Amino acid sequence: MRHLLWWFCGGTAFSLSVFAQGGKVRLGIAGIMMSGMWVANGLSQDLPLGVVMAGAWQGAELAIWRSASGRLSAWNDRCPHRGMRLSHGFVRGETLSCIYHGWTYDSDGACSKIPAHPAMVPPAAIKADVYQCVEADGVIWVAPVGAEVALPDLSGLAAVRSITVQAGVAEIARTLPGFVCEGAVWRGQVEGGAVVLVLQDRGAAVTVHALSAGDRVVVSRWLDGLRRLVEEGALA
């Protein structure tokens, strides 16, 4: 495989490559998220109070959870004790507990309770790896600690839903004529209504978080058609 061209769009670097496949020469487009980039990990409406879900940032697996007061946290998805996925855990008030041995962590990631040793104060070194996690305009964003908070303006739009497409960013981009790329954000229109698609690259698949100023039912049906078109094209 040979890279013919590199270019940048927002916080993403794209490469145009040529490679041989099945005796034919093909072109491919690959997108790479640049370091420090905020990555969309869902719509606010999909993470209610007291719920934890799995997320990701550039290949790192995350546990993203909302406390009883509404505070968002994003951590490495492994309990420091035995490596169990914290996204399988449970939220109690302002804490998240591992489902394996019940080790409990405060919102800053520090272990606050070890059920097997209730009288012991957990060492400060027992702490989950923490990421920044914020929400804006109905979207949940994650980045490493210290990243500048510079998020796209999605005001005036209502969340529609998220779908996962079994294809790459390049395949989706080819099916979005008329949409304008702003990093991971694609802006366009569906039947006269403004639509924004925030792409979350998962490697072998892409999760599309959709918002719109138009008819949400129309956009939801359009998303189903987009997924079929992209996946059928990726298999061709």
Image (cartoon, helix red, strand yellow):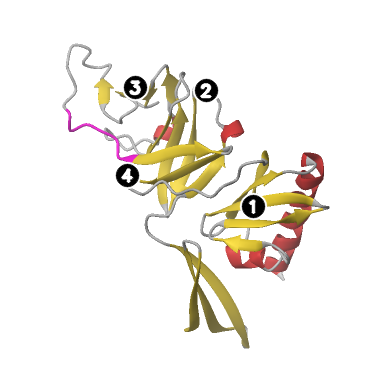
User: Which image quadrant: the C terminus?
Assistant: bottom right
| Horizontal relation, residue 106 to residue 227: left or right | left
Q: Is residue 53 magenta?
A: no
Whether 88 is drawn above or below 140: the answer is: above
Q: Which mark is residue 47?
A: none
Residue of label 4: 145
Q: Nearer the viewer, residue 123 or 183?
A: 183
Q: Residues within 10 Å of mark 2 (few under 14, many from 20)?
A: some
Q: Kindly indicate whether the residue at mark 1 contacts the one at mark 3 (C-beta within 8 angstroms).
A: no
Residue of label 3: 102
Find numbered disc 1 in the image and state the secondary structure of the residue it sits on.
Answer: strand
Q: Which mark is residue 197?
A: 1
Q: Which mark is residue 49?
A: 2
Q: Earlier in the sequence, mark 2 or mark 4?
A: 2
Residue under the point 55% across and 84% down: 18
- Magenta residue span: 124-130
The residue type indicated by label 1 comes to: Leu
The residue type indicated by label 4 comes to: Val
Calculate the distance from the C-alpha at mark 4 to the C-alpha at mark 3.
Answer: 26 Å
Q: Earlier in the sequence, mark 4 or mark 1?
A: 4
